[in-house]
Image: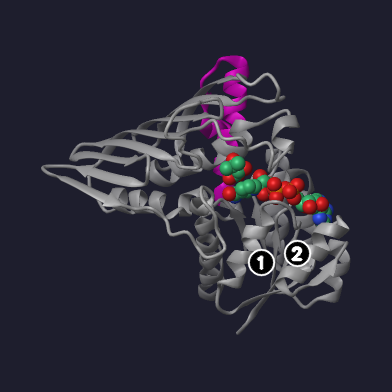
Amino acid sequence: MMLKGALIGAGFFAQNQMHGWAGIEGVEIVAVCDRDPARRDKTAARFGARPYADAAEMLAAEALDFVDIATTVASHRPLVERAAAAGVHVICQKPFAGTMTDARAMIAAVDTAGKTLMVHENFRWQSAVRAAIDALRGGAIGQPFFGRVSFRSGYDVFSGQPYLATDPRFIIQDLGIHILDVARALFGDVATLSATTRRINQGIRGEDVATMLLEHESGVTSVVDCSYATRRQPETFPETLLEIDGDGGTLRLDAGYRLVIQTAGEQVRDVAPPVLPWAEQPWHNIQESVQIIQQHFVDCLRAGVQPETSGHDNLKTLALVEAAYRSAADRTRIDMRAAE
Ligand code: NAD
Ligand code: 89V
């Protein structure tokens, strides 16, 4: 059966989501909603969907199976609650919520409606990152005991996403959230977290460097380090680099999408993502993961199972974000069992 969806928020990143949907069998995006007339009309015309200025009007007029919310965080709660009241499944972009209270309210609304809620937390679905996750889960280096999950760049993200320069919170809320989620996908849930933050670029409002130390319930200690103030060659945006030690060997995801596994011998794999026909370097890595997470959502709906990054799951990633800001401000180590 064809699934009918609608996009809410037709801005910078949503174009990738529309391209992604166009490549997924059995899904049709029939409507596009944005308050900005130029954005909604352009996106609707480009992808052959009906344009709407108002989400409530669209939900009343269209017979939808799901909505894909691609607005920034401030509008997520009213939009998710409205979609839940209309009885449709929901995908919502990260950061899912600005507070744990908002996150819990959205989860409860969709649960009450008996529908599925997935947070568009796509970094763990990047094919290179997924190759590392699969190798680790498959026991390639035995039991891991140390991990570094690292994203360091000097790329100008502000021209495409100007709000990143003016929001009071920057790198942990926007990017660290992905990297913390990858650490959870690799090493499991977190027992304690401590963090430091810095602002190197004085032209922005929030922090652009964050270094976090995580003790996982599995016994792994990981360092999650993020920077948009790192000028180096090669510029690795938007690659997440990994360094993992296990009792049977080491695994690295190196710059240039090189997966290196050293045990008795060495195995080197090129895990570079394809550049999809609509994608462009260097964003192709993220763009491919959009289509992969969308396919995961559709597969889960059809199978009647929860997506990996369901609302409930994402609460744990959001709690790490909150804990990192608190730890950096108070210079304390946060016990996550008390923080969720
Ligand atoms: P944007 O500002 O370019 O686009 C958001 C659009 O939503 C705007 O056109 C705005 O008019 C519209 N909008 C806002 N409230 C609305 C409402 N109530 N009803 C209808 N339309 C509304 O933002 P962006 O850069 O595209 O980012 C959107 C989200 O995507 C952010 O949460 C961002 O963090 C996330 N993002 C995710 C990734 C990723 O890889 N997962 C990458 C980039 C951005
Ligand atoms: O993926 C994201 O959420 C983007 C960026 C890579 C720029 O941080 O906002």
Residue 50 relative to residue 117: left or right: right
Quarter the C terminus occupies: top right
Quarter the N terminus occupies: bottom right
Residue extending furthest toward the top:
331
Nearer the observer, disc 1 or disc 2? 2
* Residue at 50% in and 40% down: 237
Kindly report the distance in space between the C-alpha atoms of the residues bearing marks 1 and 2: 27 Å
Residue 43 disc label:
2
* Crowd rating for badge 1 (residues with CA inside 10 Å; few <14, some 14–19, many 20+): some
Residue 172 relative to residue 136: left or right: right
Work out whether residue 160 or residue 95 is closer to the camera in this orientation and state it. 160
Majority secondary structure in the magenta region: helix
Mark sitting earlier along the chain (1/2): 2
- Based on the displayed image, in which of its 4 quarters is residue 202 positioned? top right
**Residue 149 location in percent, x, y?**
42, 35
Residue 218 disc label:
none
Query: Is 117 within the magenta?
Result: no
Magenta residues, as a range? Answer: 313-340
Q: Secondary structure at mark 2?
A: helix
Name the amino acid, label 2. Answer: Thr
* Residue at 56% in and 70% down: 298
